[in-house]
Amino acid sequence: MTGRGPAHGPELTATTTAGEAPQSVGVAGSVASTGAPFNEGSPSFWAKLSKSSPLAALILQRLALSVALLFAVSLMIFGGVEALPGDFATTYLGQSATPQAIENIRKDLGLDQPATTRYFKWLGGAVQGDFGNSWASKNSVSEQIGKRLGNSLFLAFFAAIISVPLAVGLGMLAVQYRNRLPDKIINVISLAAISLPEFFVGYLLILFFAVQMGVATFPATVYESMTIGQRLSAIALPTATLVLVVLAHMMRMTRAAILNVMSSAYVETAELKGLGSLRVIAKHAAPNALAPVINVIALNLAYLVVGVVVVEVVFVYPGMGQYMVDAVTVRDMPVVQACGLIFAAFYIFLNMFADILAIIANPRLRHPR
Amino acid sequence: MPDLLSVKNLKIEATSYPPGEPPRTVTLVEGVSFDVEKGKVLGLIGESGAGKSTIGLTALAYGRGGVRITGGEVLLNGQDLLKLGPNGIRKVRGAKVCYVAQSAAAAFNPAHRLGEQVIEASLKHGIMSRADAEKRALYLFKVLGLPNPETFGQRYPHQVSGGQLQRAMTAMALCPNPELIVFDEPTTALDVTTQIDVLAAIKHAIEETNTAALYITHDLAVVAQITDDILVLRHGKMVEYGSVKQIIEAPTQDYTRALVNVRGTKREEAPDQSDTLLKVENITAGYSNGFKVLQNVSLHLPKGQTLAVVGESGSGKSTLARVITGLLPPQEGTISFDGKPLPKALKGRSNDELRRVQMIYQMADTAMNPRQTVRDIVGRPLTFYYGLRGAKKTERVKELLEQIEMGGRFADRYPAELSGGQKQRVAIARALAAKPELILCDEPTSALDPLVAEGILKLLLKLQDETHVSYMFITHDIAIVRAIADSVAVMHRGKLVRFGPKSKVLSPPFDDYTDLLLKSVPEMEIGWLEKVLTTRRMESAGN
């Protein structure tokens, strides 16, 4: 698991938000209670909205929370980077560092200004999509990130469209054959996949498919001149690695969530209607198990974008993760900050979408009395 | 006429896993045989654990949890359901035999519209086309008296009331034109005023469609209204099997006689009700969202007597108890206890003020810490209020357990090792331990079987004679009010409708609500339901 340690850093915060979501989703009254401070005295717009359309009110609330959270995160990223030991000028100049040269570079980069001024300048630019220029290459950070992010999303997209349906399908299958052989096989294999560090899975796949059988491409580096077919063939192995890594988590959650619902009275009703067991699971159990499953899927999608540093390094894939790691080694702060903020935005907004979907999946909120 | 359903010598077993012991097989039902003719209704009656639901579900060859049907025959039109494979039995379930669950609120899938769920079985079994099924659902919604039958199917389960859900569940069972319906306590979770409507709707629908039914209940008065034959069960065995008339009017077994005469407790009301202990004046209370659960409620309770607070769910009975205990401080109004005003909020009350008012809850299960022994549960208030420890505490716990007719040998048991009635007795002992002057009883018997409930009521009356404690007894059951109250408060939608000595409140002239409430309580009399319905029709025709 050592390989996943650093990559999982941001997931901690994301897990807590996801964990709180089902509670607030289940309680329609939470809107009324959070809205309460606003509607002392005459009924405000908010109070009216939460009464007439609790769904819209809840979704608006989530949106506002996400934006607020993103600002808090930007502050933490900036503060964290400030507090980092080491200095770009010293690293850049190496042995030729004289106090005067360091001072000059600091002045060039605007580091002599107070931190608050720099923060607001940076934030103001970031809101407009301008993350400044890289200190090392002097190029626009936004431009460089644009390409890298595209590559990362390309990889994540294919990993997601394979792993999500596969995980939900296997989860349902495991419920259908619960405690029998197919369930046990699915469980053991998924447990093995989740237990192996992804760099190990990656190297195993390279060994078998690229080296011994020669059917896959390695390294998985993509260039702008490649056709879509070449690109797909290049990302086959990293995609397979990512699928194996995220599959088990989603599959097990689907299984647990559906099993939890299987003991409810309405599932018994469905069985006593003489329905087939797959229909009972898919039509009667699964819709009521959506909320937790959606949350886990969102977490894993976020991981696919953000947490793939190791996989990108193993397969020499030019994505965001590798870009950020390179930037950290040379103390290229604008790049580190930009990557950090974009990663955080992915986590926060994917979780927000999960929350909103879970809210929409709840018929009590979708159809108030 | 050949029997539609014929159950012969049924044996049902389950495997239990006692902690720390090897698993063992428990026999739940043994030697049960009965027949149901086409278009007839058989009532299965008995207390909880008698195996009623388990037997009812065998008509669908279904075992709940780890329950297995290990012996006997279940013949539907001469075909043994137990010998059908999983595919064969699937064709019977939801097509020839349908099931109506006790809690329709839990048995409907919250994610789908009611209409879809009602017609699902008919469509999946290919019994009728979607158009026909929808037409039949509409017809059934009308027969069952559901509001706006045209649009009722568009609604989700959380959008309709409990009584309506129970009727929708009946419609769901009737929709595929089954030959037999198993009703599993369909009205137990409902208020009496709603129960009578649902009972009437079920009876009407069964007659209209000429469907046979198994009707499971623990309430003999209900079963007398709706069935042709009755099978009395106890501990998984048959006690008595005969026609309704024979069982109600001439029971041959002691157990059946006890069931028929269960409401035998009767207490005369106290003549002098002037020595007031608790006085509640103009209480208005509610929650932060502005909804007022109680509106301007005033009542009082004399020392050493019982005030019954009666009303349906949502009438504010339990909230009144919460206000008196201080758990929910009222927005307006005052509470005085023994002549002195009582601080509104729990925090403002002294230890002694807390001690004098104790509470007993509906669910003794959830009101006790499952990881504490009876000794700890009953001993806690002894230490808290009286500082008793060691031998003195042990002695007092033993005394209390004897007072509730259980004895000291129960002191080391955990709640899970007690029956429902025993748990409620321990809860009573815990309340008594504080030597309170007032005990608020929040439906303490409504989750218990009639005979067990009867025992609890007798115990409460005995304890009142011994200790002169006052009770505020919250209930929805008029029979209990008749049995134990000195004064009665009738509540409806957060307001006090009627209050006074029992003899006055329960005798005419009535207000409309009290009249409805009193007339809705099923009586152990064949034909009572028809009589009530006829009177209602005549009254509405007269208006």
Image: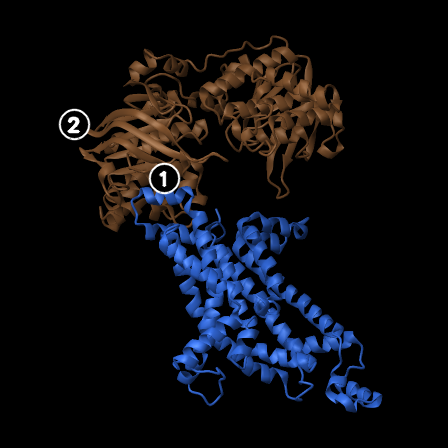
Badge 2 marks a residue whose secondary structure is loop
Q: How is the image coloured?
A: by chain
Horizontal side of B30 relative to B276 (left or right) equals left
Residue B310 is tagged as none
Q: Residue furthest right?
A: A99
- Residue A279 placement (x, y as % from top left): 33, 52
Mark 1 residue crowding within 10 angstroms, few (<14) / some (14–19) / many (20+): many
Chain B tint in image = brown
B404 vs A40, nearest the viewer = B404
Q: Residue at x 44, y 54 (%)?
A: A255
Q: Residue B105's x, y, as percent?
A: 43, 40
Q: Is residue A360 visible?
A: no
Q: Is residue A211 left or right of residue A53?
A: left
Circle 2 residue:
B2
Give the answer, above or below, for where A150 lies relative to B352: below
Labels 1 and 2 touching (C-beta < 8 A):
no
Q: Nearer the viewer, residue B531 or A189?
A: A189
Residue type, label 1: Ala
Q: Colour of chain A?
A: blue
Image coords of residue B461 (percent x, y): 57, 14
Subunit of label 1? B
**Left-right relation of A93 to A127:** right
Q: Secondary structure at mark 1?
A: helix
Real-space Cα separation, disc 1 to disc 2, in angstroms: 31 Å
Of the pair B148 and B38, the residue shown nearer to us? B38
